[in-house]
Amino acid sequence: RAPHKACCKQLSVGYLKAKVVQFIFNSNRSFLCFWFSMAKNCENKETDARIEKHPLQNNWQLWYYKPDKSKHWAENQLSVTSFATVEDFWALYNHIELASNLQVGCDYSIFKNGIEPMWEDPRNKRGGRWVFAFGKKNVSPKELDEMWLEVLLCLIGEGFGEESDQVCGAVINIRPKMDKIAIWTSDCKSSQAVMKIGKILKQRMGYMETANYEAHGDTQTRQGSTARHMYTV
């Protein structure tokens, strides 16, 4: 894989196209899985325009956070691009840096359009997040990238059934000793929905440790490990 600057490329489905995209809908909800193999570059924009695209149920926005002490936290959170189809997602994913290759202190976030990856957003302020932590010594970069991709597919594929409306987005934090993947939900008091989301994520990632759910309001008033765990799976 050739190196790429994180999130700085001009993205287009013209870079590549999905050779195989298959949708599987379960009996309860349109939960999709993807089978694909990436083919050669499209020859031109006209060819690209003729590709049949498969819309996602929601539009999504990619954000990139890079710490800069001279700026306010919100100014370091950069909106990169949005996508609304299966093909656009894969074009984006295959043309940005892998999460494991980001500099320490950086984040990727993918949120539904109209929701910013910050506690103050109206859709987030009454919610919380499931946190899955990965020690550098216990999880390889390849494994981290595979789990992050699994989370993204679950996210954009509406893999939480009727609880998918509760999901706001996902964040991966790259840190010196321990990386984290978090799923943000809109209502921390919807215990049944929150627990279902946590259990599905844990199973999809094959996560063997205990995962904790923290309310954003509690996290704001406490620091690090002192945040109260509302739920665990």
Image (spheres, rainbow, N blue to C red):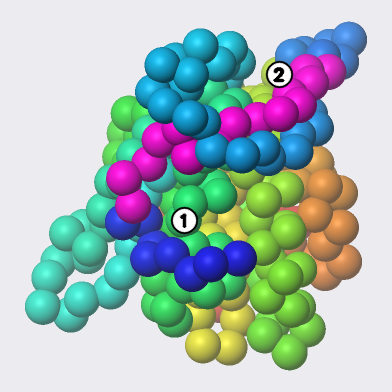
Who is closer to the viewer here, 119 or 141?
Answer: 141
Residue drawn at point x = 12 percent, y = 70 percent: 71
Residue beneath disc 1: 96
Left or right of 214 on screen, residue 39: right
Quadrant of the snapshot with the N terminus: bottom right
The dot on residue 162 is: 2
Who is closer to the viewer here, 189 or 201?
Answer: 201
Amino acid type of the residue that numbered disc 1 sits on in the rendered structure: Ile
Asked if residue 125 is among those painted magenta in the image, a careful observer would answer: no
Above or below, comparing residue 210 to residue 12 in the picture: below
Magenta segment: 9-24
Above or below, comparing residue 25 to residue 20 in the picture: above
Residue 97 visible in rendering = yes
**Could you tell me which secondary element the residue under label 1 belongs to?**
loop
Residue 173 visible in rendering = no
Q: Where is residue 111 in the image (x, y as percent from the top left)?
A: 45, 39
The dot on residue 31 is: none
Q: Position of residue 121 (x, y in %)?
A: 30, 40
Residue drawn at point x = 71 percent, y = 19 percent: 162
Amino acid type of the residue that numbered disc 2 sits on in the rendered structure: Glu
Left or right of 148 on screen, residue 105: left
Nearer-N-terminus badge (2/1): 1
Residue drawn at point x = 41 percent, y = 16 percent: 46
Label the magenta part by its dominant secondary structure: loop
